[in-house]
């Protein structure tokens, strides 16, 4: 493996000149810079970011941990954070926890061992486990995104999840539905409970009593949501509409509707949280509540950069607003 010394020898310059070319810390003439870069390309030299970080006391790495990279919400979030971090001169080290609290803890330890300057995490775990993650992070700044409980002693960026659920449910109810069910996320997650509270609040505001049989868990995954959707559809008093608490479960519920031979919205109306690129491509196009992913990435990085620049103020909680995107998946009850 090529070293900085090898680059300096091939370019006929000092090691200090190679270092200055790479860091941009001091001026290097265009001619010398060209020789150094040509030598780097020829040798395939890659600077050791971890070693550089140890030497300078700073690192250009930041961590990003998400629970599920197959979910379009997190795919778009990773892209947004990576793009914005690169513009700020940082490289993103991505970890995927697959919804396991233990894996989240291991990934935070990994980010620390790689000398990451800080980490943004969208935890899939409970409030108690979120507290443990903050302890594991130690002095490394940690920003929690999406499923971030108010009790977290770290900077957090969330949307108003109750309002998001109310927007979708109010839209369903505006067509005159009275038998409205929900497919919700795992009960241990703060974000799931908030969306369920918002759904129930919307029903109560319209004088409708939430029924236990009309609440099914889909655990934020396609297969479980398909099963939950079929359970609802096969009830003796079938709901005329379903509010779905995230995009993965929306796909599962639409699979259940198709398996049952029903039509949306003629037989059953559907609305969900999380807009995604395929929502307009369904027939009919799906009504969703959009999360401001770009703004969430901006806010999370802003919090992290503020901590890296020495901000020692108490942890802040940034609350962003969702947006209802009306399409054609809701209509009057049959």
Image (spheres, rainbow, N blue to C red):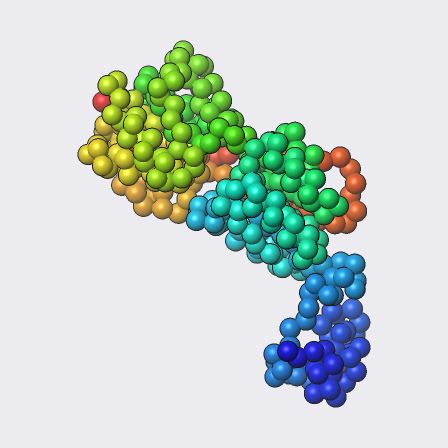
Q: Is residue 13 above or below residue 280?
A: below
**In the picture, which quadrant includes the C terminus?**
top left
The image position of residue 286, as x and y in percent, is 34, 37
Q: Is residue 88 visible?
A: no
**In the picture, which quadrant includes the N terminus?**
bottom right
The image position of residue 245, as x and y in percent, is 43, 32
Q: How many marks?
A: 0
Q: Quadrant of residue 311?
A: top right
The image position of residue 68, as x and y in percent, is 48, 46
Q: Along the line of sight, which residue is nearer the eye, 323 or 130?
A: 130
Residue at 28 percent of width and 30 percent of height: 230
Q: Is residue 66 above or below residue 23?
A: above
Q: Along the line of sight, which residue is nearer the eye, 144 or 67?
A: 67
Tell me: 154 left or right of 197: right
Tell me: 89 left or right of 282: right
Residue at 79 percent of width and 64 percent of height: 55
């Amino acid at each position: 493996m090529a070293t900085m010394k090898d680059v300096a020898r091939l370019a006929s310059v000092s090691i200090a000149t190679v270092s200055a070319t790479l860091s941009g810390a001091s001026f290097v003439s265009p001619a010398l810079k060209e020789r150094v870069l040509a030598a780097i390309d020829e040798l395939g030299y890659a600077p050791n970011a971890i070693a550089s970080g140890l030497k300078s006391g700073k690192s250009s790495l930041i961590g990003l941990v998400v629970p599920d990279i197959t979910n379009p919400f997190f795919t778009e979030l990773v892209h947004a954070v990576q793009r914005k971090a690169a513009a700020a001169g940082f490289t993103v080290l991505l970890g995927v926890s697959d919804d396991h609290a233990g894996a989240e803890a291991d990934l935070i330890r990994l980010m620390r061992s790689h000398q990451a300057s800080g980490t943004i995490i969208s935890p899939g775990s409970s409030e108690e486990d979120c507290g443990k993650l903050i302890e594991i992070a130690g002095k490394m700044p940690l920003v929690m995104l999406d499923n971030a409980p108010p009790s977290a002693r770290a900077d957090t960026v969330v949307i108003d999840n109750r309002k998001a659920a109310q927007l979708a449910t109010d839209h369903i109810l505006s067509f005159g539905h009275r038998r409205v069910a929900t497919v919700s996320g795992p009960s241990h997650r703060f974000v799931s409970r908030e969306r369920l509270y918002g759904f129930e609040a919307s029903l109560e505001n319209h004088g409708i009593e939430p029924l236990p049989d009309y609440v099914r868990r889909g655990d934020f995954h396609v297969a479980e949501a398909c099963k939950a959707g079929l359970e609802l559809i096969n009830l003796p008093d079938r709901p005329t509409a379903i509010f779905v608490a995230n995009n993965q479960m929306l796909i599962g519920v639409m699979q259940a509707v198709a398996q049952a031979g029903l039509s949306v919205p003629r037989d059953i109306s559907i609305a969900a949280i999380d807009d995604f690129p395929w929502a307009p491509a369904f027939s009919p196009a799906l009504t969703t509540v959009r999360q401001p992913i770009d703004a969430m990435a901006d806010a999370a990085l802003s919090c992290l950069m503020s901590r890296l620049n020495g901000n020692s103020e108490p942890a802040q909680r940034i609350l962003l607003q969702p947006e209802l995107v009306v399409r054609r998946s809701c209509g009057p009850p049959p």
